[in-house]
Each structure stands twice: as structure tokens, then as C-alpha cells.
Image (cartoon, rainbow, N blue to C red):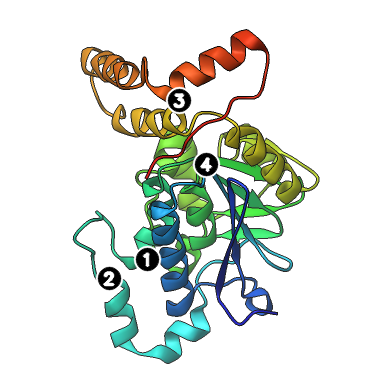
């Protein structure tokens, strides 16, 4: 087994990001946080990648914070996790979740085993979540006398009704994959979430990279806008694509009933 905490592999146009601390159910310590952020930073620069799959090695997606590691590490480690980069709104811990929104292409989380606390917030940073029916998920921070502080105010509250978010946060109760989909935490259930996520990533990766990136930016930037501003943003995004080489190739491929060949740019 690789000693790397987070392993990135790229095959074709799909990147696979593996949380690689299975003996701790991929629990989050400082090195794991930093490894996740580094993986996201790398993929922000990989122009040939059109989709990303995020998953955990071993028996779990991510069991959340590794409390033993943090208790023994001392206050200086906790202080370093609170540092904020100039080009991101979040501190290191928040950015481990939010960086998957900063990656310009669709990110799919494949969830099996458990996704507790920070592990769930990590999954919520993805664009799409495919979950095993017997997976267990929880906004667990209240059980430790804490609040969710790794981006949940932007991810959790953007996915589920406000009262559902509050109930999950106030109780820390555990839901299975089926309920997670019903509540809106996850996108769909699959017996093999990783295989389903990789198949979906391949389906996405044959689309125009310009359109994929523009669509992700559009949906991110339209949050909170009034109707007029959101519609203006749609128009601007569309005009930036119309007539470009990749857009024309997509249209011709559809008309000619063939696979499109796109360029990924610099």
C-alpha cells in the first residue's frame, strides 16, 4: 500500500482521488487535510481532466476527524489548520471540502462505509454523491460539543431544506444511504458506488470541457442572485461558448451522429 495519504491517478480524462488511510477509516488529521488540499490544487491545474471521482480506500469513505491525532498533536497543529490562503475563502480544514468546488470540472463522491462529521462535509463539497444503500452518514459534530465548520453553511444548507439541516445538526443522528438520497444529502444509491461514480465520470468526460467548466461556474455564481442577475449570467455564459471550436464540434458531432473530439486548452 502506498504511504501517501491521498493518491491521485488519472486515466483518460478522469481523475481518481483516493483517501488512503484505511487503517483509520480515512480519518482526518493534519497530514490528511493537507493531502486533500494538495490533490485539489493539482487537479485545478490539470486541464486535460474533465471529471473527478473522490472515494476512500478500505472500509469507509471517511470517518471524520481523527480525535486521537489532534489531542496528541498540540495547539500549534490546530492553529495551522485555521490558516487561510489568499486565494480561497476557507481555512485549511474548510478548504479540504470546498476545494472540490474550486476544481473547475464536475466532482463525484463515491460513499461507502461511513461518512461522519468532517467526512460527510468532505463529500458534500462534491457536485454529485453516489452512496451505498448501507452506508452511514451523520452531521456528527454536536456529539462532540461542536458545530459543523468545514463549509456546511454553503454545502449542507444548499442541498437540503433548512429544517432538515437543523434536525441533522441538532441531533447528530445517523442516516443510511437510502434516507440520505430521500433527504437530498446524496444524489442516488448504487450497490457499488465507486463503479457507478467512475461510469458516470466517463459519461461526463466525453462532453465539451468548455461547457462542463462553464456550467459549473454558472451554477456556483448564480446562488443568491436575483432573477434578472441570474438570467444575465446565463446569457453571458452561453455567449462565451457559442461559435467556439468546441461548441461547433459538439453540434457537428450531434448532427453527424458521431463521437466528438474536443481540445482541452492550456
How far from the left and from the top, in percent, is residue 243?
Answer: 37, 15
How far from the left and from the top, in percent, is residue 130?
Answer: 66, 43
The nearer-to-camera label among 4 and 2 is 4
Q: Which residue is mark 3?
A: 246
Structural distance between the alpha carbons of marks 4 and 3: 14 Å
How far from the left and from the top, in percent, is residue 256?
Answer: 64, 10
How far from the left and from the top, in percent, is residue 21?
Answer: 62, 75
The nearer-to-camera label among 3 and 2 is 3
Find residue 133 and name its label: none
The mark nearer the N terminus, 1 or 4, is 4
Tell whether 115 sits left or right of 121: right
- Which image quadrant for residue 206? top right
Disc 2 crowd rating (10 Å Cα; few below 14, some 14-19, many 20+) is: few
Name the residue located 39 percent from the left edge and 65 percent from the top edge: 146
Instruction: Identify which residue, 121 or 83, lies in the foreground.
Output: 83
Name the residue located 65 percent from the left edge and 50 percent from the top edge: 110
Disc 3 crowd rating (10 Å Cα; few below 14, some 14-19, many 20+) is: many
Q: Quadrant of the N terminus?
A: bottom right
**On screen, residue 32 above or below 95:** below
Find residue 50 and name its label: 4
Disc 1 crowd rating (10 Å Cα; few below 14, some 14-19, many 20+) is: many
Report whether residue 147 is seen: no
Structural distance between the alpha carbons of marks 3 and 1: 37 Å
Name the residue located 31 percent from the left edge and 29 percent from the top edge: 223
- Dots 3, 2 in contact, CB < 8 A: no
The mark nearer the N terminus, 4 or 3, is 4
Q: Which residue is mark 2?
A: 82
Disc 4 crowd rating (10 Å Cα; few below 14, some 14-19, many 20+) is: many
The mark nearer the N terminus, 1 or 2, is 2
Local secondary structure at mark 2:
loop
Q: Which residue is mark 1?
A: 93
Amino acid at each position: 500500500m502506498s504511504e501517501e495519504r491521498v493518491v491521485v491517478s488519472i486515466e483518460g480524462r478522469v481523475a481518481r482521488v483516493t483517501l488512503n488511510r484505511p487503517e483509520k477509516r480515512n480519518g482526518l488529521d493534519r497530514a490528511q487535510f493537507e493531502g486533500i488540499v494538495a490533490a485539489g490544487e493539482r487537479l485545478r491545474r490539470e486541464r486535460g481532466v474533465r471529471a473527478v471521482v473522490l472515494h476512500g480506500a478500505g472500509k469507509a469513505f471517511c470517518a471524520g476527524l481523527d480525535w486521537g491525532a489532534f489531542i496528541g498533536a498540540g495547539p500549534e497543529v490546530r492553529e495551522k489548520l485555521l490558516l487561510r490562503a489568499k486565494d480561497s475563502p476557507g481555512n485549511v480544514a474548510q478548504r479540504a471540502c470546498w476545494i472540490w468546488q474550486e476544481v473547475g470540472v464536475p466532482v463525484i463522491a463515491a460513499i461507502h462505509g461511513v461518512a461522519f462529521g468532517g467526512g460527510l462535509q468532505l463529500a458534500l463539497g462534491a457536485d454529485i454523491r453516489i452512496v451505498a444503500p448501507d452506508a452511514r452518514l451523520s452531521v456528527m459534530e454536536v456529539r462532540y460539543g461542536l458545530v459543523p465548520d468545514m463549509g456546511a453553511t454553503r454545502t449542507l444548507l444548499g442541498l437540503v431544506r433548512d429544517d432538515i439541516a437543523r434536525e441533522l445538526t441538532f441531533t447528530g443522528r445517523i442516516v443510511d444511504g437510502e434516507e440520505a438520497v430521500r433527504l437530498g444529502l446524496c444524489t442516488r444509491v448504487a450497490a457499488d458506488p465507486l463503479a457507478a461514480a467512475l461510469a458516470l465520470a466517463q459519461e461526463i468526460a466525453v462532453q465539451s470541457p468548455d461547457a462542463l467548466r462553464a456550467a459549473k461556474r454558472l451554477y456556483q455564481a448564480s446562488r443568491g442572485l436575483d432573477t434578472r442577475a441570474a438570467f444575465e449570467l446565463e446569457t453571458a455564459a452561453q455567449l462565451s461558448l457559442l461559435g467556439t471550436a468546441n461548441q461547433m464540434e459538439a453540434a457537428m458531432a450531434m448532427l453527424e451522429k458521431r463521437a466528438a473530439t474536443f481540445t482541452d486548452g492550456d
